[in-house]
């Protein structure tokens, strides 16, 4: 109950119709880039699951699908600074084109960790697709090749993104406002 008292409001940032439009556009770019090439798409759990599912519905290159799970936030609105690898891929990645699909790239700490890990496996290429890119908060050099939205601030929830495991089910993306 203590956490609930801190939440002031949710403000819609991106409605479902705009998310769908941007996801379809991203899928078209990915299809063009990987046409005729085998691709492995890796979903970063838990936050990217809705975005990944919607994106995959529009991918036409016969991609293999896999999942990883990293943790760096816990029940806080800020990254803990420590990344934990909770689930690894099952598909061998050596010599393959890999597209990591993430919900939000913020400080870049988790994605830089994941990139180093995947590159050490001898991937042919490694690119990142993110629903939301928060470039101004970047602490680690991470290049996001595909992004649906760029935001400058706020804590974002909905469409798979959470605060303390809440709000993932919302069909839109919201800014979560906290009490002072």
Image (spheres, rainbow, N blue to C red):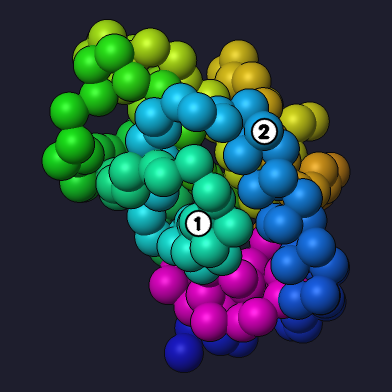
Label 2 secondary element: helix
Q: Position of residue 98 (x, y in %)?
A: 41, 28
Q: Is residue 24 left or right of residue 73?
A: right
> How many neighbours does mark 1 have within 10 angstroms: few (below 14), some (14-19), or many (20 or more)?
some
**Residue 45's quadrant in the figure?**
bottom left
Assign the C terminus to one quadrant of the image.
bottom right
Magenta-span inclusion, residue 174: yes
Please state which of residues 43 and 64 is positioned toward the viewer in this rendering.
64
Q: Which residue is mark 1?
A: 56
Q: Which residues are magenta?
A: 156-180
Q: Position of residue 18 (x, y in %)?
A: 83, 67
State if disc 2 and disc 1 touch (CB < 8 Å).
no
**Residue drawn at 33 percent across, 48 percent down:** 65
Q: Which of the two discs, 1 and 2, sits closer to the camera?
A: 2
Q: Is residue 157 above or below residue 38?
A: below
Q: Position of residue 58 (x, y in %)?
A: 59, 58
Can residue 9 be seen by looking at this rendering? Answer: yes
Q: Is residue 16 left or right of residue 131?
A: right
Q: Is residue 113 left or right of residue 130?
A: left
Can residue 144 be seen by looking at this rendering? Answer: no
Q: Which residue is mark 2?
A: 32
Please state which of residues 176 and 172 is positioned toward the viewer in this rendering.
172
Report the label total: 2
Mark positioned earlier in the residue sequence (1 or 2): 2
**Residue drawn at 61 percent across, 82 percent down:** 170
Q: Position of residue 54 (x, y in %)?
A: 56, 65
């Amino acid at each position: 109950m203590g956490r609930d008292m801190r939440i002031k409001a949710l403000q819609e940032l991106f409605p479902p119709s705009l998310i769908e439009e941007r996801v379809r556009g991203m899928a078209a770019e990915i299809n063009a880039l990987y046409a005729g090439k085998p691709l492995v798409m890796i979903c970063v759990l838990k936050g990217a699951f809705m975005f990944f599912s919607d994106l995959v519905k529009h991918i036409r290159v016969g991609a293999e699908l896999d999942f990883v799970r990293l943790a760096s936030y816990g029940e806080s609105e800020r990254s803990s600074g420590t990344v934990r690898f909770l689930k690894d891929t099952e598909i061998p990645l050596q010599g393959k084109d890999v597209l990591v699909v993430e919900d939000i790239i913020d400080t870049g700490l988790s994605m830089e960790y994941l990139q180093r890990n995947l590159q050490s496996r001898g991937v042919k290429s490694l690119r990142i697709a993110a629903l939301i890119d928060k470039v101004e908060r970047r602490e680690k050099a991470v290049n996001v090749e595909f992004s649906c939205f760029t935001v400058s601030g706020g804590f974002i929830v909905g469409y798979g993104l959470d605060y303390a495991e809440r709000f993932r089910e919302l069909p839109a993306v919201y800014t979560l406002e906290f009490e002072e």
